[in-house]
Structure formats: C-alpha cells, structure tokens
Image (spheres, rainbow, N blue to C red):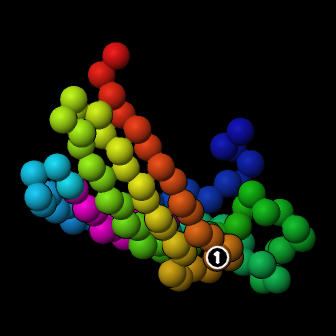
C-alpha cells in the first residue's frame, strides 16, 4: 500500500558490457537508489517506521558468462553495497542458466 508515507525513489543503473574470445561476456555496473523523501533513523519523527525510511544505496555489480555451442548461456554474478544511508551492507552471489526449450 503506497499511500502510507512511503518515500518515492529514483533508481539509476549504468554498466559496461564486454564480449571476448567468441563465447565469453563480462559486465561491470553501478546501481544507485535515491529516496526523494522519508525519515532518517534516529532523526526527527523517527519511531521505528522502517517502511518510511529515506534509503540511499549504491552497489557495484560484476558478471561473467559463457555461451556453449548449443546456445546455452552459463553466467555468474557478484554485487556489493559500496555506499549508502539507512541501508545495510549487502553482498549478492548468483548463477544463471539460459537455454532454448
């Protein structure tokens, strides 16, 4: 329910993509979330309303992928929070497989 003083946010993403050795790909990117309104933890009006937090965060992301001869794509990625306000320090790891059925 977005009508209970939940902050509006702007999301930004920029990345670089590189293909090499015919079947490999690599990406590096930066993702930023910027609240346009909200409360600060411990600031004026704060009483534990976490959904109303002004949360700003930035994360670096990296991925590496390989395409098999049948077109199946195998990928792995890593992301980490590098800056922020009212946000946690997070790390993400993931793997993906894409194929034609």
- Regarding mark 1 in the picture, which secondary structure is present there? loop
Residue situated furthest right in the rendering: 47
Q: Main secondary structure of the magenta part?
A: strand
Where, quadrant-wise, is the N terminus in this rendering?
A: top right
The residue shown at (53%, 82%) is 83
Residue situated furthest top in the rendering: 101
Residue at numbered disc 1: 89
The residue shown at (18%, 35%) is 69
Left or right, 100 with respect to 69, comes to right
Left or right, 5 with respect to 91, comes to right
Magenta segment: 25-33
Give the image location of residue 24, x and y in percent: 20, 55
- In reply to whether residue 30 is colored magenta, the answer given is yes
Q: Is residue 90 above or below residue 76?
A: below
Q: Is residue 55 above or below residue 52?
A: below
The residue shown at (36%, 34%) is 98
Query: Which residue occupies the foreground of this view, 79 or 19?
Result: 19
Quadrant in the rendering for residue 35: bottom right
Give the image location of residue 56, x and y in percent: 56, 73
Q: Total marks drawn?
A: 1
Decide if residue 32 is in sight here. Answer: no
Q: Is residue 29 above or below residue 2?
A: below
Quadrant in the rendering for residue 74: top left
How packed mark 1 is, by other alpha carbons closer than 10 Å (few <14, some 14-19, many 20 or more), is: few
Residue situated furthest front in the rendering: 69
Where, quadrant-wise, is the C terminus in this rendering?
A: top left
């Amino acid at each position: 329910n977005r009508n209970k003083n939940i902050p509006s946010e702007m999301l930004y993403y920029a990345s670089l993509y590189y293909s090499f050795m015919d079947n490999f790909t690599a990406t590096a990117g930066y993702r930023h979330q910027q609240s346009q309104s909200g409360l600060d933890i411990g600031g004026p009006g704060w009483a534990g309303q976490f959904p109303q937090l002004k949360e700003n965060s930035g994360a670096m992301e990296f991925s590496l992928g390989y395409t098999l001869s049948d077109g199946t794509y195998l990928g792995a990625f890593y992301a980490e929070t590098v800056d922020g306000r009212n946000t946690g320090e997070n790390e993400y790891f993931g793997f993906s497989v894409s194929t034609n059925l």
